[in-house]
Every structure is written in C-alpha cells, then in structure tokens.
Amino acid sequence: MMKVKRRILIIDDNDIFCESVHDLLTDEKTDVLMANTGKDGLKLCKETKIDVVILDQKLPDTEGIALCPAILKQNEQTKIIFVTAYPSFNNAIEAIKVGAHDYLSKPFEMAELELTVKQAFRTQELEKTEQIQDYQNTKDTVEHELIAGHGIFDEINRTIDLAAGTDAPVLITGETGTGKNVVARAIHYKSDLPTKLFLTANCAAFPENLIEAELFGSEKGAFTGASSTRKGIFELAEGGTLMLDEIGSMPIHLQSKLLGVLEEKKIRRIGSETVKPISVRIIAAANNDLEEAIKEKTFRNDLYYRLSVIRIHIPPLRERKNDIPKLCEYFIGKMSRDASIRLSDPELGKLMEYEWPGNVRELKNVIERSLIIQRGQTLRPSLLLKNNITPYSHSAPAALDDEEILPLEMTEKNCISRALKKFNGNYSQSAKALGISLSTLKRKVKSYNL
C-alpha cells in the first residue's frame, strides 16, 4: 500500500534559500514544493494538501502576513512557519494573530528551521489524535444512550444520575449481554468527565500471570519479557473512568491489591519502589453472583463492599420484555438506511415471546442479520431465533412457501455479498453480523470469488 507523503511548501523569492531548504527537508517521507510569489504559492495550496508552509514576509506581489488567512482557508490544519529578515516584536505578534504556527528571524541556522518543522509536524499529529478522540467521545455519547421502556429502567436511570454526581465506586451486575457497558458509559458521560478517557479492562481476558502488569504497569526488567517500562491501565485512565469488567474473574491474590488502590488512590508498578497517586473513577461489572463467590471464598467480601458503594442490577431481557419494541425500533433505525422498514405486529409478537438467553446483545445481532438477508420491505428476525427454523432450511415456515427457493450455496453467496456491501467491505463487521468467524468469511469470499 502506497504511503501518503507529507508536503512542505516554501514561498520565498530567494532561489538559493528555496533550494537549500528543499535539499535539507526532502526525504522518503516528505515532498518539498517551491514558489517564488504569493500567487503561485496560494495556487499550490489550492491544488494539493499542504502540511507545512515556510512563508517569507516580503514577497514580490504581497506581504506574507496578508497571505496567511488565504492559506489557512484552503486547509485549516496547515502549519505556517513565518520567516522574515525584518524581525520585530510587533511583526511576530501580528503573524501569530493571523494564524502563523511559529516565527523565525533571518538569518537562522538550518538546524533551527529543521527543528521548527519537526515541531510543526508533531503538533499536527497531536491535533489529529485529539480530533479522533473528540469524535470517538461524541460517537460513544450518541451510541451508548439507554434505550428502554418505562418501569424497571426508571429506577436504574435514577441510580445512574446519582452515580454520575459522585466519584464513588459503582458495581453493575447482570447477565452477559444485558448492557452493563452501556450503563457504565452512561454514568461516565453524565458525570463531569465526558471529555476524559473511558477505558475498559476485561479481567477475564488477561492471562493470570500478566493481569497485574496490565492493570498497574511494570518497570523494565521487572519480569521475563519486560523489555521496557510500561504504564498500566490505571495510569492510562488518569482523570477519567476505568471499567473493570468481569471483576469476579480477578485472581484472589490481586483483589487485596485492588482494594488498596481503591482505599489509598495510589498504585505501584511491578518492580518499582515509587508510589504514584491516581485519580480514576472506578466502575466494576460482574455477570456472576459475587455474593455466592464470597461464600466460596473466591471473592473478597471487603472488596465487594468497597466496590458496591453504588449498586446497579440490570435484569435480563426476558424480565423486561416491554423494552423489546423500543430496542427493535432503535436498532433498525441505526442499522438501516431505509426509513420505511418496520416490524409487523405478528413478528414483534414472536420476538416478545422469545426468552432471549443472549439478552440485548442477541437481539441486536438478530436484527442486524435479518436486515442483511431481508427481501424488499419484509423483515423476519423471528426466523433467526435459536428455537426456530432458519430461513435457509428446506422446511421453512409456510410464509416462505411462495418465494423462490435458491440453492444453499447461492443463498450463502448472496448473503455474504449483501453483508460486505452493507458494511462497505469491512470483513470484521460483516463476519460479526453473519455470525461466523473472520477466517471463515475470508475463506468463503475466496471460494465464491467475491
């Protein structure tokens, strides 16, 4: 895959200066363009994306300061390094006011210019990272709103509001797929931390011998394989929220250390003598019965009481079936571009009768898959339920008898093709929606020559 090069533009009427800077800054990652007038420089800015502009104050046809706003109008991310042979404090202030990133006075060492350009690129990268984070935060805020009917969730919403107003630890319990992560994010975004990081650590996903290093960090040489100093998740989440998912899977010998962190608000990396203060909002989640785990001595009761200062239990979907219509409406609206698609009352009735062992996560998956295989405006997610017959079976319900029966291979090929089209060729999302592994999807794509 061809890498996109960074572009530097020199706008200066001194050919010797332009050539010198060109030779200095051109490398395998960077292209350097040159222009001797403001008009030619601005034309290049309009024709191509320029990352950094080295701009002279005095040009044959204009002043550099007058050119700055026009350059930034083409690309507000461009970093302008203003250079002048007539330095003054007022000129520097004026240049910064009109959008210059930095200011150099001629004559200067080429090493100074090279360092200034590197700093401009670095600033640009940091701004992009911040923009991505802001986008992700906004996206998370929108995508993790609570969708529910009235009743059970009224009390949960009140508790979420209560939790958002304090930094006390929160324990969220419920079966897998009920929406514990959604509730945790709701607490985060309703608190005074919405612009801070929200990180999730799944305690069951880490190997037992590495979970301590993942959580609290490690110093170089602290153990075999520790080739460098690493921050743990607690340090990375500084100032934000850390969700410890499947907390019941944490080894008993680490539970006392976590309790100490919660009490003292300090951590110590493995292999370090230095104690670091931390400020992290802790939300724990469990899909197993922690009270039973306490009886079996696999979970510390003192840690349980420390984590459950605020307790939220999310009932399984089978106990709050009134939420199903709203959830279906939300998922269909989010996943389909066709605003006219609706579930019929008989179809919705079948979904209401189902027990949903996989909870909301299963409902979302069923709706997503039914949208992929739909024909026309007909949406039949009930055909994908575990206790029903799939739409690919020869013994499909009578409702499908009047439809053309395609060979299984062709049906599978069409289904995969639709999924890839829906997700713009994204294999991971397509595989997830189809309920198959990524490797299986890739193999079938190759087999069907899609």
Image: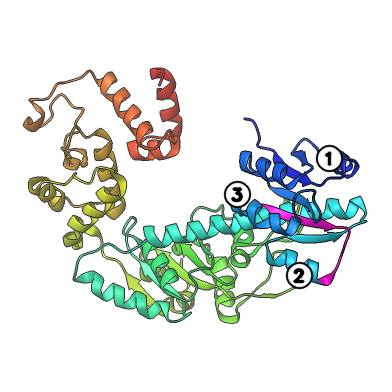
Q: Label 2 is placed on what type of residue?
A: Ile
Mark 3 — residue? 74
| Residue 92, placed above or below residue 427 | below
Indicate the position of residue 176 as horizontal and vertical percent values: 34, 56
Determine which quarter of the picture holds residue 435.
Answer: top left
- Cα separation between marks 1 and 2: 28 Å
- Cα separation between marks 3 and 1: 23 Å
| Residue 220, placed above or below residue 34 | below
Residue at 48 percent of width and 69 percent of height: 194
Q: Which of marks 1 and 2 is in front?
A: 2
Position of the C terminus by quadrant:
top left
Q: What stretch is highlighted in magenta?
A: 78-89
Mark 2 — residue? 93
Relative side of 145 to 124, left or right: left
- Looking at the rendered structure, which numbered label has been put on residue 22? 1
Residue at 46 percent of width and 66 percent of height: 298
Q: Dot 3 surroundings within 10 Å: few (below 14), some, or many (20 or more)?
A: some
